[in-house]
Amino acid sequence: MTLVSYDPAARLWLLSTAGSSYAIRLDEDDVLRQVHWGRPLTLEQALTAAAVPAAAPGSSFDGITGEEYPAEGGARFGLPSLQLRHADGSRGVHWQYLGHGIETGAAAPEASPAVGEEGTRPCELTIRFRDRHYPLELDLHYRLRPSSEVLERRAVLRHTESESEPWGEPVRLLRMDAACWTLPPLPDYRLSHVTGGWSSEGRLRRTSIPVAETVLTSRRGITSHQANPWLMLDDGSATEDSGEVWSTALAWSGSWRITVQRAPEGVVSCTGGSGHEGLVVRLLPGDSWETPVFAGQYAQDGFGGASRAWHRHIADHVLPRAAELRPVLYNSWEATGFRVSEQNQLQLAAKAAELGVELFVMDDGWFGARRDDTAGLGDWTPSAEAFPDGLGPLVAEVRRLGMRFGLWVEPEMVNPDSDLYREHPDWVLRQPHRERSTLRNQLVLDLARPEVAAWAHARLDALVSEYAVNYLKWDMNRPFTDAGRPGHPDPDRLWFDHVHAVHALMARLRSDHPGLRIEACAGGGGRVDLGVLAHADSAWTSDNTDALDRIGIQHGYSQLYPARTMSAWVTDSPNPLTGRSLPLAFRFHVAMAGALGIGGDLRSWTEAELRQAADLVARYKRIRPVVQQGAQYRHRNAVQHVLGEESVLIAWQLPVPHGVPIPPLRLAALDPAARYRDQETGRLHEGALLLARGLDVRLDLGLTGDFSSTVVHLRREGG
Ligand code: DGJ
């Protein structure tokens, strides 16, 4: 398949995936405009679309719209993707087209008109501009892969002058988004996104888009629980299974902003990138500034289709080790809190091993003077009180029990009451003459300072090496506040540099310790995004482990992120957060829709509960490849995964008033000509009937009471 085609006469590029086309062209003023984003087009068809003349401005009050990467300058009145101020006080840019390059795979980058690519290698189009007066260059990058529907866009800005030259002055970068995506004209527009808070992440919202600017953002230095940097747009008629959906997602783990603009003239676009409003960065002569990726994709098969395309992309092109099955883990947090000790961890490890757990993770409380959240953070040596002989005996026992060993860390943080802070009080983010707000009694370390990053690396590297740690749960329990660097000429850079430093630290540890796996966490799901998932294997979805609440949280999570990354624990009943009591099977089944873990206090589970839990863990291991690696279909009160000849349905029953009919559950993505055998009961089902009529919730699935639940594992006969 030709991923990128170019027509030199029209100066038009056509970017193609199997299911979509994206066309852009330069107009006579070197302004890059989008021609098409949607169903697949041939180059000829894209040229025809480009030949339609743009509507002339109706009055002197109208401005330039529909640009691919709008900047300030001239009659532009929409929100710019790029805003800057030159040293002489002039604002904005006036681009001149310099040329383009199409690079295939890792091969040489030289421009080759009308070339695309064959085979499976990625292809990257770069379109280059320079300012007509000031020493600035801009590269717009577009990356495609034959096996993905996702188009990855980013931008690079360069200050091309050297210090000795007349313009050798810094440029102030006021805003630089990664990309702006424009939608085709539709009768109406609807926005889908998630909102929430700590322990209530991922609430899916669908709202009509007002004729206004709608801002989705985090100003917290982390991705945030309150919003997640992706959105889906449709004309209001798309469903889970049908309709056109345009979606975008930002690969960034710090503050971010995506603005959806619905102009009074009707044009809808969304521009997005790292950082929140008001941050200013100095671009020095010779410097360049690179945005993260703001990716987009078009789907014709509804929200479910859009989600599956993101899941595939993340698995194939974002995650470091997507093909590896995620282990069943045990985590100590809800059982022992900060009060970990060698003895209580050994007790939990013994119980966990009996259940079939494969990875034992000791959470917060194992280091320094950390007996609660007031002290010790930053002192990454085992607490002598909790572990008189170090972690060695516990680690040895965990391994003897046949499990891998994981450890909780929070490397970006420090308690003022810690040896680290006493030694380096200047290592924290702070502003001159301002109070530093402690949240959860902790401050944020300025990880972008080389000496702080070197310290964090040395401590983590030593820990991982000494105990052959297999897994780090990497937490981050407060947003940035009062963030500054006294004396630094460019203090706002820390908002960006911190994120790069975290990603770099994760990457370095992984490359030095190939067996190491990382779970991304920020007080639950506060740091889940395509940026961190390039360095992590899973993400802690939420501190809310109530299985009923989790159904909604997981639904929101699944809109973009694949099940294999969704860390999900079974904990105690009543749930410590919500006080709700739920059956053990229900708690398991909900967690089995992701990467299963157990987080309850196993010492208080009855023998019968432990036996049932062991059975359910064994069951999970049988369905795990399908859940973790299959395509996911969301149904009402159920989720279905399909991989090759197998399909797994996890279904639950929520309270319904008496007399309200419960429709059968129709399955998806099966072969109507095939038969499927239930791997537990041996019952044979016709694929056609599973698709057309579905399974009766009471009779076939046996869901007869509130919070009853089931797992059905089907395998194609003769497959
Ligand atoms: C927040 C995490 O989300 C929890 O799972 C736990 O690790 C605590 N931090 C520990 O402080």
Image: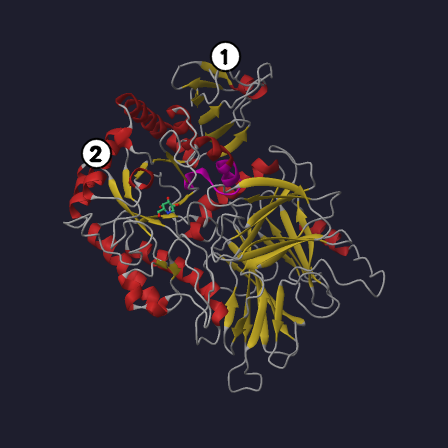
Q: Circle 1 is placed at which residue position? A: 699
Asked whether 242 or 711 is in front, the reply is 711
Position of 697 relative to 136 (above/below): above
Q: Amino acid at mark 1?
A: Leu
Magenta stretch encompasses residue 557: yes
Whether label 2 lies within 8 Å of ligand 1 gets the answer: no
Q: Which residue is mark 2?
A: 350
Neighbourhood count class around disc 2 (C-alpha, 10 Å): few under 14, some 14–19, many 20 upward: some
Residue 355 image-quadrant placement: top left
Point out the tag, 1 or 2, that comes first from the N-terminus.
2
What coloring was used for the rendering? secondary structure
Residue 250 coordinates in the image, percent (x, y): 53, 53
Taking 406 as reference, is 143 left or right? right
Tag 1, which secondary structure?
loop
- Direction from residue 54 to residue 588 in the image, left or right: left
Q: Is residue 214 magenta?
A: no
447 sits left or right of 342 in the view: right
Residue that appears at 83% across and 60% down: 56
Q: Is residue 86 above or below residue 268?
A: below
- The residue drawn where x is 34% and y is 66% is 452
Q: Is residue 187 left or right of residue 617?
A: right
Point out the stretch of residues depicted in magenta: 553-566
